[in-house]
Amino acid sequence: MTTLQQGMGGVAEQLHPANLPPVLAGPGAAWWSGLFGLVALVVVGLVMTAVMQSSTAAIAVTLSANYAGAIGLDQGCALIIGQNIGTATSSAMAAIGASNTAKRLALAYILFKLIAALIALVLFPIVIPLLVRASSTIDGVTLLAAYHTAYNVVGVLVVLPLIDKLTRFVEQILPERGSPLTRCLDPSVLATPIATVEAVRRTVARALTTMCASLDSALVAAGHGEVIRPKQDTGTVAAAADALRQAQEFMSGMNGPPESEDEQRRLTSTLHALDHASRLAETAGEEAELGSVSNGPDELRAVQLCAEAMRSAALVADEVAAPITSSAATVARRGTQRSLDALACDGAATSTEEALSRLEHCAKELGELQRTYRCTTLSSGTDGTLTADQAISRVDTMRRVEGLARHAWRAATHLVGSGAVSTEPRPDVPH
């Protein structure tokens, strides 16, 4: 600051406030000429920051120029407005060629700076006379520094209550190009192993949420005698299976192994969750349908248990995947919300721990039911009650239903386990 002030002493001999255009609300400034001068100095301030790539340096020059008498207080305020806008040029250039998330962040920052500048320009005719009167007792450098601080504080206070609307606006301008299920798979995080693991973990959780919600609907329909066929739309099993394949490829590009033992344990749990979720997708996608269920008590009980397991798994995975706030992710969460509502209507617990316990109970009971059902059904194929094809088909359907619940349970368990980095290994966690 001392060097700048000394340098500006020479500039003050060549430059005087009268050499710069008068600004709105400044001493002796007419309306139109003052408005032109205000806009001109805002542009000059913006260019200063863009060239220096530092608003701090640009504002320091402004403060030093005012201290040396080269610019007036009102002209300094106009320059500060432009210099604050110019800060966004660094973000704009950094976003070139970056991921969609980085571009959204840069756009949000630019919008914030523009909103703050608009507020400052609207209040300019009111604020400048107050600062001019205060300059009789407070030096101009202090007033300019206070103006710069108040400028940003007021901008934050105005934008903060509107943050949700601003977020939706940015998402509409820069919509998600790919699937909302894979939005976490940003190549920029590959350099950090723990960030890569977390990105894959959330992707697995979102895919699991989507699959379980779709399967829940299919199993409910199966209870009424329909074929167990997951809905084939953009947010169901096919999209989830593709997201899991991308997550596997993404993790393969991780830059080196995790450093700590806790991070390695987190990676292992995430890989287990990815494996079981992939098996769930494979089971659900076999021949695009799982088969039909007869109206026997064992079959109906199996469907009921599997549907309940899907709802619980969707709840657990949804907690791991949260937050998903973009409008593009609404499709992926629509089925999940139905599952969560169903749990609430059934009087089930809605906490992650209770949902996981409920999921484990359903999977284990269904496993026991499947073993007894296999023996009973195959015996019916030998006494003439069922043909061999019918018996084997029913056993195969029951096997697939049991596999859905088992893989959902294990995937959800490992997702929750990978979320607690410091958790010690438990012998009862399924592998």
Image (cartoon, grey):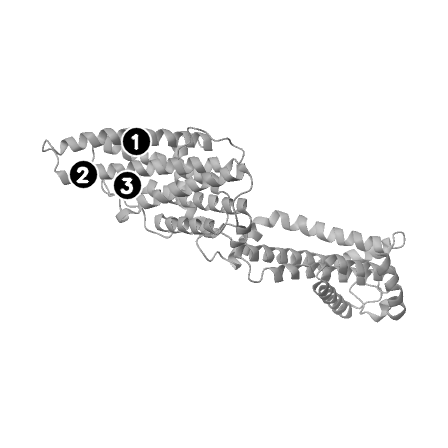
Residue hosting label 2: 392
Q: Earlier in the sequence, mark 3 or mark 1?
A: 3
Which amino acid, mark 2?
Answer: Ile
Which amino acid, mark 1?
Answer: Gly
How far, Cα to Cα, is label 2 from label 3? Answer: 22 Å
Which label is found at residue 367? 1
Comparing 51 with 76, the one in front is 51
In this view, the mark in front (2 or 3):
2
Comparing 111 with 275, the one in front is 275
Q: Residues within 10 Å of mark 2 (few under 14, many from 20)?
A: some
Residue 102 lies, in percent from the top left, at: 56, 55
Q: Secondary structure at mark 1?
A: helix
Residue 106 lies, in percent from the top left, at: 60, 57
Q: Secondary structure at mark 2?
A: helix
Quadrant, the N terminus: bottom right
In this view, the mark in front (3 or 1):
1
Residue 283 lies, in percent from the top left, at: 31, 43
Residue hosting label 3: 221
How far, Cα to Cα, is label 3 from label 1? Answer: 22 Å
